Image (cartoon, rainbow, N blue to C red):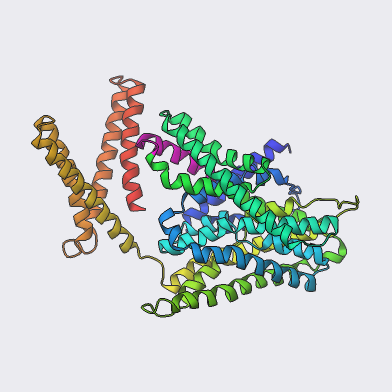
Amino acid sequence: MTDLTAVLLLVALATLVATGARRWSLPAPSLLVVAGVAIGLLPFTPDLHVPPQAISVGVLPPLLYASAEEIPVRELRLVWRPVTTLALGLVLASAAAVGFVAGLVTPLSPAMAFVLGAVLASTDPVAVTALGRRLSLPPRVQTMVQAESLFNDATSLVLFKVAVGTAVAASAVSIPAAAGEFLLLGGGGAAVGALVAGAVTLLRRRTGDPVLETVIALVTPYAAYVLAEDAHTSGVTAVVVAGVILGGTGHRLTDARIRLQVHAVYRTVVFLLESVVFAVIGLELPSLIHQLSPGERTWPLGVLAVSVTLIACRMLWIFPLSLVVQYRAPARPVSWRLPAVVTWAGTRGVMPLAAALSIPVLADDGTPLPHRSLVLVLTTGVVVLTLVLQGFTLAPVVKYSGIALEPEHTARQEAEAERSLALAGLRRLDELAALEAAPQPVLDQLRRDLSAKRDHADAVLDDTQDPSGTLMTAYQDLRADLLQAEEAELTRLYESRAVTDTIRRKLQRNLDLEQAGYDDGDG
């Protein structure tokens, strides 16, 4: 089997499983990992070896960028204190706890146990974002969980470099040197990310072509990552900072047509990369196990012990922190619900795997680095276990906690905004009518369209008039039926040669955009 064939089969498998996950309302990362492990255990499946650069350079930048773009800057300002505490303190505590436990239950040396702790210390932004998309968490909670997983990577990366340097060179840890390296990696990466975001902003303001905008959107995360790494700073931090800045300002840089195209292309890329990378995690575990020596066969105990340690450490850190925050807000009763959800959302994923794969094979003296294969197995095993255990149970935990937003709340908030937009349009239309800025038939048609949007929003908001949403559902069903009739007529016109292919494509796009608007409203 050639490498190209293997890649195509992997993409087909990942797409099939991810599609099934959406149909069955299951978390796609968890199902992809399970499918990968199951296929990797088959006797005819070849061992899978993924170069570290394929994940750290090829896959991570766009996924991190997409996660960072989803973080609202307004909400981030409100949660920066707990995010900083988690991104610094909890990462250090988790690394120390995992290193201590791994040294007790596995044959790892203290240096390699420290490497394992540094690898698994931080939560994974790709996994957290992928799992969080299907949950209706309050905006502040969603932002806190995602921001923690994005900004704790600088801390984890410094720990990892210090740990690997200690294991490879057998040197002592220098606290001042580690602190200086943290400032260089985190601060330098943030500066590079801000510069890239500024350059992209200037470029996009002078670009009006959808194809060029799409290329810029795809290249931006890679540019931020590579430039930061070449400057010996944190590429991950650079991508995150660039994503947060452009995510908050990008909608003002382009028009609606370009935004629709860029969004569609980027969603496709993210879907494919997420699907493939989570399947790869599952596929790699059986092949890594084959490389273990007889003395390392107790790895399942190590995976279980490290996973329990990570969850327990996260719980012991978050619950007291939450209590302190809640006691400072006496108007609200103390509750376990929020810390429980934040604790259970701390899954591991792609980032630890990329870090573990980049561990050197040889020490400075030329001898093989001891137990490197065991660190890879333990890392991948913990990633698989947390994705499966926490991934499949996160939705029930959120539902039981009662903090998830009800669909009616989201629909009502959306309807209120839609009504405000329609009223703003009607007010502007009245101003234009007073100035006689357009022919009366045009003004009347626009008034009917805006009034229909306002009436649609009123039907959602008026529970006494439409308590079960019957009018809204009937309106959407009828409009969908009318759209089908219009599509059938367009097909007839094209087949009878009444319109050219260019006109057919343009009118079909208009119908598709209208249909997409109703689909988004339903979803």
State yes or no: residue 262 in magenta.
yes
* Left or right: 279 as drawn, with respect to 175: left
* Left or right: 455 as drawn, with respect to 300: left
- Residue at image x 58%, y 62%? 87
Q: Nearer the viewer, residue 366 or 245?
A: 245
Tell me where residue 222 appears, x and y as whole percent: 59, 39
State yes or no: residue 96 in magenta.
no
- Residue at image x 42%, y 59%? 75
In this orientation, does residue 410 appear? yes
Our reading of the magenta stretch's main secondary structure is helix
* Left or right: 69 as drawn, with respect to 108: left
Q: Nearer the viewer, residue 463 or 172?
A: 172
In this orientation, does residue 36 appear? no
Tell me where residue 461 appears, x and y as whole percent: 22, 60
Quadrant of image for the N terminus = top right
Over which residues does the magenta segment extend?
253-273
Q: Nearer the viewer, residue 272 or 161?
A: 161
- Residue at image x 66%, y 72%? 308
Please identify the quarter of the rendering in which residue 481 is found: top left
